[in-house]
Image (cartoon, rainbow, N blue to C red):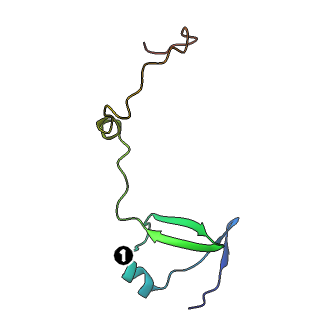
């Protein structure tokens, strides 16, 4: 299918046909992954946003990725110790 790229502000935009959006479950305001592979644009839907909360990230720490404390020297501001 050929579609026309159009200017949108300082960027370029393309419209995703309804059939393509329905097939890939892309809706208005969906977040997608955009990559450049061998000079081709590849747009992939993301099923759900990753959880980047502190508790989620801390739960990923284990013996294999835990590192020793690093001494960065004395405080130079109002850092919490």
How far across and how far down the image is residue 51, in percent? 35, 48
Give the farthest residue toward the top. 74
Which residue: 55% across, 10% down? Answer: 73
Depth order, front residue of 46/73: 73
Residue 11 in which image quadrant: bottom right
Residue 23, located in which quarter of the rendered image?
A: bottom left
In x, y percent, where is residue 16?
Answer: 51, 80
| Residue appearing at x 42%, y 87% in the figure | 19
* Residue 47, above or below 67: below
Q: Quadrant of residue 77?
A: top right
Q: Position of residue 33 (x, y in %)?
A: 49, 64
Q: Residue 65, position in %: x, y?
A: 38, 34
Left or right, residue 43 beside residue 81: right
Q: Is residue 70 above or below residue 6?
A: above
Disc 1: which residue? 25
How many discs mark residues in the rendered view? 1
- Would residue 79 be found to the left or right of residue 41 on screen? left
Label 1: few (<14), some or many (≥20) within 10 Å? few
Asked whether 5 or 23 is in front, the reply is 23
Left or right: residue 9 compared with residue 17: right
Quarter in which the N terminus is drawn: bottom right
**Quarter containing the C terminus:** top left
- Residue at image position (42%, 21%) is 68
Q: What residue do we see at 44% from left, 66% from top? A: 29
Q: Residue furthest bottom?
A: 1
Q: Identify whether 9 is placed above or below 15.
A: above
Q: Secondary structure at mark 1?
A: loop
């Amino acid at each position: 299918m050929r579609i026309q790229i159009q200017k949108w502000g300082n960027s370029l935009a393309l419209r995703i046909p309804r059939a393509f959006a329905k097939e890939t479950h892309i809706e208005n305001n969906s977040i997608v992954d955009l990559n450049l592979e061998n000079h081709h644009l590849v747009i992939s839907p993301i099923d759900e946003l990753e959880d980047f909360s502190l508790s989620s990230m801390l739960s990923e720490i284990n013996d294999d990725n835990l590192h020793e404390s690093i001494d960065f020297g004395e405080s130079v501001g109002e850092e919490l110790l």
